[in-house]
Structure formats: structure tokens, C-alpha cells
Image: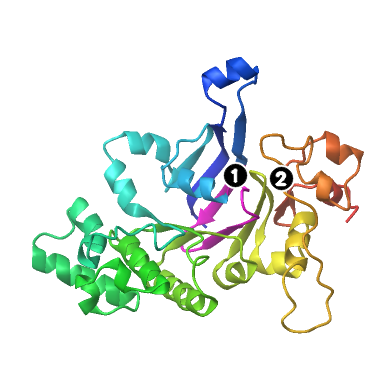
Amino acid sequence: MMALVEVKDLAKTFDVSAPWLNRVVERKPRQFVHAVDGVSFSIAKGRTLALVGESGCGKSTVARLLVGLYTPTRGAVSFDGRDTGATLKSGEARTLRRRMQMIFQDPYASLNPRWKVLDIVGEPLREHGMAEGGDVLRQRVAELLESVGLAAADVHKFPHQFSGGQRQRISIARALATQPEFLVCDEPTSALDVSVQAQVLNIMKDLQRQRGLTYLFISHNLAVVRHVSDDVGVMYLGRLVELSPKQALFAQPRHPYTRMLLDAIPDIKMSGRSRTPVQGEVPNPLNPPSGCSFHPRCPHANERCSRERPALLDFQGIRVACHAVEEGRI
């Protein structure tokens, strides 16, 4: 299958140093956070890749790198066979922006409270010259709202007149306005109630079927990931530790961190499986552990794990970065 999105060795480093004078007086060095540290994956057309991990592992930074909100420190993102960094600097930037859109996490912060829904959803249409005249615009916005399960009459309302789930539907309608092929969804349901989450996720799945959309879906909720994804990438401290088709990941997780995440899910089916909470704390990203960054929390770690950083290797179609898996210890 043709990959629509391809990411190679993507990295982003942020300078989080104290101001210059403080550093001089307190004799402190500059400090850097490697938010994303050499991530590679590809997403085939019409499929959904979910990125999973604890807070602060770099998932949202990957999302912003993909749509061009951040520029990578190293590595490249290519969309439909072309480098996005180069395209965004060229005259074709508008076309690329039309083809890829982002849905943000917080439906309360991502909509302008002073604008009516007509202006919010209509802005991308006006910006890209896709709706000439007020009547055409109103008609298009009404169609978009209906496609996400809202009423055409909602165009004259303000965001404060909607619930969280309805606001997120407005965000989805806005993202769909330019008829994109690729949507980056940064935890689009984490701010919503569980019952509303299901509705929003079902809308997203229906839209994917109707329009052949490709998704990068970012979440820390494994139940959500199981519902929407085709492939799953597990991130830990800025790196991918496992990349696998969804069925394989949930049936037979390989990496000790993936196992730990899955063991922490409550056992709703009451199968008697023992539930173990996630052990230990996420290390300080300013001072990450040597070797494999997961080794201080890993029950299978040995001396090699603390010394040598594992590469993401192929094991029967599943990619895992773990010395213990490579050596057959687990």
C-alpha cells in the first residue's frame, strides 16, 4: 500500500534554559528537552495510526511537527511523496495546508468565543477561496454541521451555547471544511464524558469511511485506541518503543512498557486477570536515564539495558525497541 504520510528520524529539541543572566550568576549550563527523539513511521492512505503513551512522552509534539506548527530539529516528514518542510516554504503551502488539518484537544480553547459557528467553520472556506458569496458559505457550513450530527440552524449560535461534545463536533466540521485527506487528531475526546466520547469517535469513523480519510490519532486512552486505530505506536520519553497492528498489540504485547500499560486497564469482562498498576514514575526529561530510557522501571532490565540504547527492530512484522525481546528473554 502507498504510504500517504512518512516520517523519518523525526526529532525536536526545545531550549528550556533559564534566562542568560540567571545562568551567569548561578553558573548553570543551558538545558534542552528532547521532546521527540528519532521517531520513524508511515501511515497508508485510508488507515489510522494511533500514538499512545503517558503524559509528556512527546505525542502532541509529533502531531504539531506533522502539520508544520513546529519545525523539526532533524529528520523529515513527507506527505504524498513530497517533503512537507520544503513544500510549506514554497508557493504550494496553501494547497498542502488544505490537504492536512488538525483537531485539537480542548474544545473550549480551540474555538473563538466571540465568533458565531458560521464564522468559525466558514473561515477555512473563505481563506482558501472555496465559497464565494454569503449564501454559498452558509449552505456549505450547514452541510458540514449536518455531516457531524449538528443542525443547520446552529450556524447563528456562539460556542458557549454548546456542550463540550458539540463543540468538538464543530472543531471536526471546521477541520473537514477544506476537504482534507489527512487529519491529525490530538486527543480529540480526552476532555469529554465517556458517553460523548463514543459518539464523537463514531462520527470520526463514519467520516473516514465516507471520505477515505487518513488519521494520526493521539491518545493516552487504550480503550479509545482499540476502537479507532488500525496500527498502534507506543511512545516513551520521545521515542517509539513498539509499532504494531492493533490486533497483534492487544493480543500479544512485546515491549515491557506496552505490557505495563495494558495490565493497568481495568478488567471489565471479569476474567480474573490480575490488574497491576503502572510501576514507577516517568523520568525527568531534562535528565533521561542512560541506555534504554525505560530500564529503571523495567522488570527485565539488565546491565546492557542501562548502557546501550535499543534500536527499533523488526520481529515478524512488529517493530520493537527492546534488548530483552531481541535476546529472547521475554
Q: Residue at x 62, y 27 (%)?
A: 31
Residue 136 position in % (x across, y down): 12, 67
- Is the residue 311 above or below the residue 280 in the image? above
Q: Amino acid at mark 1?
A: Ser
Q: Is residue 93 left or right of residue 84?
A: left
Q: Is residue 246 left or right of residue 12?
A: right
Foreground residue among 237 and 125: 237
- 10 Å crowding of disc 1: few (<14), some (14-19), many (20+): some
- Is the residue 211 above or below the residue 14 in the image? below
- 10 Å crowding of disc 2: few (<14), some (14-19), many (20+): some
- Is the residue 162 above or below the residue 97 in the image? below
Secondary element under disc 2, as helix, strand or loop, is loop
How far apart are the alpha carbons under marks 2 and 1?
9 Å
Q: Quadrant of residue 33?
A: top right
Foreground residue among 326 and 169: 169
Q: Amino acid at mark 2?
A: Leu
Foreground residue among 288 and 209: 288
Residue, disc 2: 312
Q: Residue at x 82, y 50 (%)?
A: 297
* Quadrant in which the C terminus appears: bottom right
Q: Is residue 93 left or right of residue 197?
A: left
Residue 6 position in % (x across, y down): 51, 47
Q: Residue at x 36, y 69 (%)?
A: 167
Residue, disc 1: 40
Foreground residue among 108 and 291: 108
Q: Is residue 280 left or right of residue 186?
A: right
Q: Residue 83, can we see it?
A: no
Q: Quadrant of residue 310?
A: top right
Q: Are marks 2 and 1 in contact (CB under 8 Å)?
A: yes
Span colored in magenta: 39-58
